[in-house]
Image (cartoon, rainbow, N blue to C red):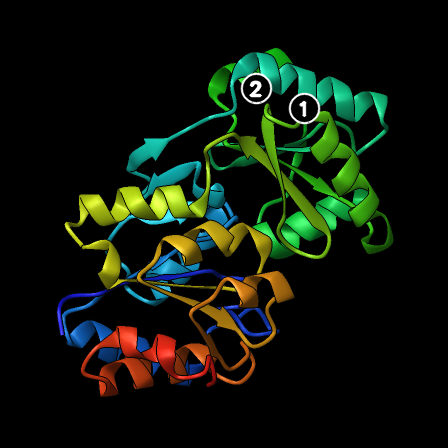
Amino acid sequence: MKRLLLALDLDGTLLNSSLSISPETKKRLREFRRHGHLVTIATGRPLQATRKYALELDIDIPLILNNGALIADAEGKVHHFNPVEPSLARIFLDYCRDQKLPCSIYVGEDIYQRRPDPLGAKLHQTHDLTVPRVATDLDQIISLGIANFAVPIEVERLEAVYRQMQAEFARRLQVVRTEKYFLDIFNLGVSKGEALQNLAALLDVEQKNVVAVGDNHNDLEMLRYAGLGVAMDGADALVKQNADYITAGNDEDGIALLIKKILASADHLTLASSNKGA
């Protein structure tokens, strides 16, 4: 088997419901790397919320962060960055103000809130391991380069806000559902799939030898790009429809089971014809 590149989403995929990596998954990932294969993380989270997991797994290749807007290693060395265009950033911030929507702004390893928002602050502390700051100078923040925006919102409002925002910013910005409380907004053309393609080229890994695993809409492009796109059992229905293979859920060691099957096969691509079952 040729060298593979395994790209793993974090929430709902690599991480279990306790936001940790199970011992069995760690064991299988070490085994996978001992066979000469590569492992990275591909997440909507920023670097500060991803670094601890990369260090825990001894990942020594670049990470895909902020839904692909940033490719950087755990030490912070940037390999690729596609920030939101400044004039569009201002338009989006004005839109959130007019619609009275909370808005989080991702800049480097900082997260700013356009205005204080208790729900957003709680979610960022849990998922991004960051206490957000309230923005006092939006022009200065925009000039630093915004990786993406996030709109933290109650579950019952998310779908309506998502559709309204998609219609408002069609062909200008991407609006993606990431977690049940979050909408992420970033440049057109930015995706985990685009970033994974860039990373594979950087590491000299053929497309057919890329394996991508995820569970939500922001994972769709990387699953479509990969030679083997894998959905978790708890994934959104649309993600499952676009996957080549479905593994067990994130609380059932789905990643560990996937790696076991890949290493036991003569060709990882044969999993795509195994009825999409774990």
Q: Measuring from the top left, give residue 132's x and y in whole percent.
A: 65, 38
Image quadrant occupied by the N terminus: bottom left
Residue marked by disc 1? 135
Name the residue type under label 2: Ile
Asked if residue 148 is positioned above or below residue 209 in the image, the reply reads above
Asked if residue 207 is positioned above or below residue 275 in the image, the reply reads above
Give the distance between the C-alpha atoms of the residues marked 1 and 2, in whole angstroms: 8 Å
Q: Are marks 1 and 2 in contact (CB under 8 Å)?
A: yes
Q: Measuring from the top left, give residue 257's x and y in whole percent.
A: 40, 85
Residue in view at x 27 percent, y 46 percent:
199
Q: Measuring from the top left, give residue 272's x and y in whole percent.
A: 37, 75
Q: Measuring from the top left, give residue 157's x and y in whole percent.
A: 85, 48
Asked if residue 9 is positioned above or below residue 31 in the image, the reply reads above
Q: Is residue 121 left or right of residue 271?
A: right
Residue in view at x 35 percent, y 41 percent:
71
Residue in view at x 49 percent, y 42 percent:
66
Look at the numbered disc 2 and give the secondary structure of its residue: helix
Name the residue type under label 1: Ala
Q: As rendered, which of 211 and 95 lies closer to the eye?
A: 211
Residue marked by disc 2? 141
